[in-house]
Amino acid sequence: MFHYRRLSFVVAALAAAITVASSPATTAVATPTTYPLHTSGRWILRPDGQRVKLASVNWSGAESPEFVVGGLDRATIGHIAGWIRANGFNSVRIPWSNEMYEHNPVVADRYVRANPELKGKRALDVLDRVVDALGRAGLMVVLDNHVSRADWCCNGKDGNGLWYTAAYPESHWIADWRGIVTRYRNRPQVVAAELRNEIRDAGGVSPTWGDGNPRTDWAAAAERGGNAVLAANRNLLVVVGGLNYQTDLTGAYHRPIRLKVGGRLVYAAHAYKWEYDVNHGYGPFSKQLGARWGYLVAQGKPYTAPVWVSEFGTCITWTAGCDKADSNFSNGIQRYLREGDIDWAYWQLNGTQSAGTGRQHGALDYYGLLNTAWTGAANAASVARIKALEKMTQRP
């Protein structure tokens, strides 16, 4: 459960952190000189010390029982990568599952029918092609260990709430991270590893932060996993999400993550309308964000680090399933990200659903930026608003 400890401090710290610098606004664009990335204070930086702002989109599906990113039955990889770049994004978060990595099954032909060269390919071979296409388009890639058993995420009963399961223990999680990092070590566009998605209660076991319990202490596990990633490729950023579906990073106030390689830590938060007070004005909403994770970008503190909102999303088609809370949330989170010039990743790119619990392959995804044909925007006005967040307004 989230506790509003030291709320007055973190709100004041956040107010100081989001003071906009006088430098001109620019759009963050990935180029070959971007890599590798490192961090200093609240910033993600290029090798020359210039800031890189992650303006990202999630491309899901590889974590699903289909074992492949969505949309390859509708459009070519090159077309999708080109659309992402043409709309100003500089990076893509790709969720994957331990099941996909360890079993590496052949992807069913029907899921790649718009890309006939992928017929008969295994999951990791297809992922290679996706990563390569994104790199050719000038896009950075963040690999996100989303779930252990392949499925749609997330709920409290899906068995994927911790960083390990009975079938995929911590030793597998660490070995799989070593393996996938090694696989992409020579692809410099792969710039970061998000260790685990949405840590939460699992089977009556509640995760903790910093209590030393090997079964529950996510902070300690994140250090073990992060150090394993860095042992395989010390150039990667290591992304650590919070507790309670990645909404609570308050533990880092007293117990920050410490990795063996400095300048690599990024914290990740998630934001959706059902997790915050979105109906009583911007003030209460922004205080919640600041208390839970926004305080981390206050400079000069023992806990200071970049925060990347690796998932935020809302109903984008404005048809069935959309309500006033979607509008309130969208306005509020975009204002917060804009005023703080915070790194982010929109959930999600996909115009159609991949298979999984509660999902139907090919059905409309209400949160997707692309239309169901994967040919263009589902809602051009919504995409334009998100694109406006790409501008960089603050620098070290």
Image (cartoon, helix red, strand yellow):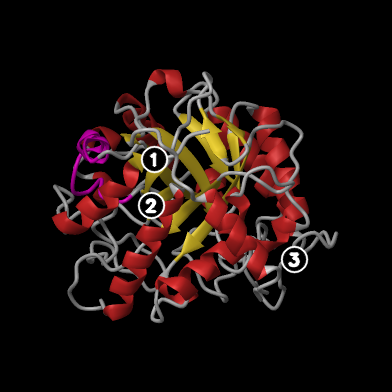
Q: Earlier in the sequence, mark 3 or mark 2?
A: 3
Q: Are marks 2 and 1 in contact (CB under 8 Å)?
A: yes
Secondary structure type for disc 3: loop
Q: Quadrant of residue 246?
A: bottom right
| Magenta residue span | 70-87
Q: Nearer the viewer, mark 3 or mark 2?
A: 2
209 left or right, relative to 82: right
Q: Cβ–Cβ below 8 Å for labels 1 and 3?
A: no
- Front one among 9 and 194: 9
Please give the label number shown on residue 80: none
Q: Which residue is mark 2?
A: 338
Residue 387 seen from this side: yes
Identify the mark nearer the N-term, 1 or 3.
3
Q: Position of residue 5 (x, y in %)?
A: 70, 71
Residue at image location 53% in from the left, 46% down from the top: 103
The total of numbered circles placed on residues is 3
Q: Which residue is mark 1?
A: 393
Q: Nearer the viewer, residue 227 or 39?
A: 39
- Disc 3 target residue: 208
Q: Amino acid at mark 1?
A: Thr
How many residues crowd mark 1 within 10 Å: few (<14), some (14–19), many (20+)?
A: many
Q: Amino acid at mark 3?
A: Thr
Look at label 2 and name its amino acid: Arg
